[in-house]
Image (cartoon, coloured by chain):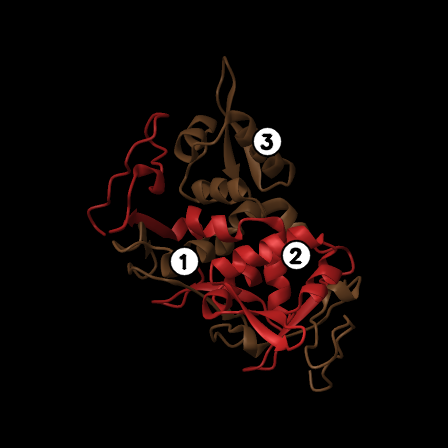
Chain colours: A red, B brown
Amino acid sequence: MARSVSVIGDRWTLLILRDCFLRVRRFEDFQERLGITRPILASRLKKLVDAFVLVKVPYQQRPVRYEYRLTQKGLDLYPIVMSIVHWGDVYMAGKKGRPLLHTHDLCSKHFDPVLVCSECGEPLVAKQVHVHRGPGAKSARHLPLDSDLPIARHVAKEKAAS
Amino acid sequence: MARSVSVIGDRWTLLILRDCFLRVRRFEDFQERLGITRPILASRLKKLVDAFVLVKVPYQQRPVRYEYRLTQKGLDLYPIVMSIVHWGDVYMAGKKGRPLLHTHDLCSKHFDPVLVCSECGEPLVAKQVHVHRGPGAKSARHLPLDSDLPIARHVAKEKAAS
């Protein structure tokens, strides 16, 4: 997760990505909507292009001007952005209610996003998920802390049944 | 989304929250796992307590020591954290594979998280979602940019059919 967070774990970057999913593509539009300084916006867009989350595409010649479009890697950030928006709708919306409503083309209804298990389709709840060391585990830092044991960090034991 | 991002849109905060879901609760454990300085860790934990995402609970008397537990508001960040972890698994994992595997208690299988529509259950794709002004909309900054029109920002028209 540390590597993902190094790409998206920044206030402005998350707001830029939200706007990308609202079909904002041009430097001036990001700047006007977000009220962000040009150098900060330029640095965040460059970082997202370098990470292959956005790609620069020319939309005008003489002078050449570029717009920023989400790549597939960027489009796959949608669950993250939608989950943040939904959490804000539940816990941060003012008395008047949500600033935005979402409708789903497939069913034509207003909806909420729900994170479910790919295997059984049931909504995911933290307490019903167990974490195990994967093939790419490099250190105990990745592993869950077994809170039954004393304070010191230790490598959690895999459950035999898994 | 700006208000949500002001709470969670920070590299360290996201890593602290990841560890909370791995059952890390004590200051020293966060510090050791994350390699974070004490002042930064203390400031991020205080911010999460102030935002009612974590709650301080005493686990020892004389001297009193506290641990940090997720509130319901904090537990509801799970889809965000899981979505970030999954995106990292897809795009950031090294050659050896994922550092962690997740099993779901309800079906006992390794799974991926999938964000679906609450109404029809189909996976959500950005292109199949339309955004409309909600009751709490305060400014055009929240609304999608209609990229068919010239550069200037404007209030997007609601589609009649919705």
Residue B72 seen in render: yes
Task: Report whether A114 appears left or right of B52.
Answer: left
Mark 3 element type? helix
Q: Is residue A119 above or below residue A95?
A: below
Mark 1 falls on what kind of element?
helix
User: Which of disc 3 and disc 1 is earlier in sequence?
Assistant: 3
Q: Quadrant of the C terminus of chain B?
A: bottom right
As displayed, is residue A62 above or below residue B54? below
Residue B45 position in % (x across, y down): 56, 34
Residue shown at 46% from the left, 40% from the top: B20
> Mark 1 packing: few (<14 Cα in 10 Å), some, or many (20+)?
many
Decide if residue A13 is in sight here: no
Q: Nearer the viewer, residue A94 or A70?
A: A70
Q: Residues within 10 Å of mark 2 (few under 14, many from 20)?
A: many
Q: Position of residue A40 (x, y in %)?
A: 65, 51
Taking depth in this image into account, of A43 and A143 the one nearest to the observer is: A43
| Residue type, label 1 | His
State which chain disc 1 sits on: B
Q: Quadrant of residue A63?
A: bottom right
Q: Amino acid at mark 2?
A: Met
Name the residue at 75% across, 78% down. B150
Q: CA distance from mark 1 to mark 3?
A: 28 Å
Residue holding disc 2: B1
Query: Do the residues marked 3 and 2 share a common chain?
Result: yes
Sequence-first disc among 3 and 2: 2
